[in-house]
Image (cartoon, helix red, strand yellow):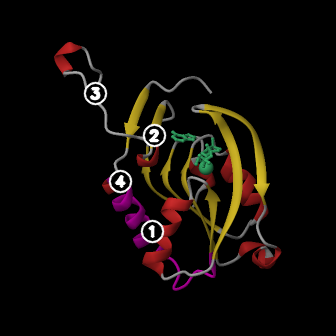
Amino acid sequence: MSTPEKSFPVSWEQFHRDARALAWRLAGQRAEWKAIVCITRGGLVPAAIIARELGTRLIETVCIASYHEYDTQGELQVLKDIAPSLREDDGDGILIVDDLTDTGKTAALVRAMLPKAHFATVYAKPKGRPLVDTFITEVSQDTWIFFPWDLGLSFQAPIAKGSAG
Ligand SMILES: O=P(O)(O)OC[C@H]1O[C@H](OP(=O)(O)OP(=O)(O)O)[C@H](O)[C@@H]1O
Ligand code: HPA
Ligand SMILES: [Mg+2]
């Protein structure tokens, strides 16, 4: 992946609002989800918010790592699989949650594990978009999303001194 040109920093408040908006949409699509399967680690945060809104108590993880150095994707590694009991019926009635889809590689891998599950992300880039069923905000492929758990407060140079903002 080439280094993204634009950045899209997301605050905790904005992330909470966007994850809640996703929960509203999901609530309108099915009365009850059997379980949430969240893709760690990024999916853990929206999964907690969505589970609270939808009243879902059964939460499973599928542990996948691919971006080993900030914005460079390597081989996808499945560190922990989905429990066999949740793989019955090809995932029908299961909600898969992740923070975002970028190239769509992670989504494609998990979709193959649960072909009938519903795939939801808070953010989506164009390449990954066809692989998700529901998302809230689309950002361009050359944008890097900075999540609140990766950010900290720091001094900002004044715009007039050349800060890109
Ligand atoms: O659509 P893709 O190009 O496959 O990228 C999307 C995935 O990349 C990030 O996870 P990452 O592998 O960095 O692990 P993390 O969730 O532990 O940060 C993100 O949380 C998605 O799961
Ligand atoms: O834009 C992104 N932001 C954070 N993590 C990511 N993993 C893939 N793409 C991104
Ligand atoms: Mg992830």
Residue at image mark 4: 12
Q: Magenta includes 118?
A: no
Is the shortest distance between ligand 2 and the CB of mark 4 under 8 Å?
no
How many angstroms separate mark 1 from mark 3 (CA)? 29 Å
Which residue range is magenta in the image? Answer: 14-35
Residue at image mark 3: 165
Mark 1 neighbour density, 10 Å: few (under 14) some (14–19) many (20 or more)? some
Disc 2 + disc 3, Cβ < 8 Å: no
Amino acid tagged 2 = Ile
Residue at image mark 2: 145
In the depicted structure, whether residue 43 falls above or below residue 71: below
The C terminus, quarter of image: top left
Q: Main secondary structure of the magenta part?
A: helix
Amino acid tagged 3 = Gly
Say which label, 2 or 3, has the lower sequence index: 2
Amino acid tagged 1 = Ile
Say which label, 4 or 3, has the lower sequence index: 4
What number is the disc on residue 49? 1
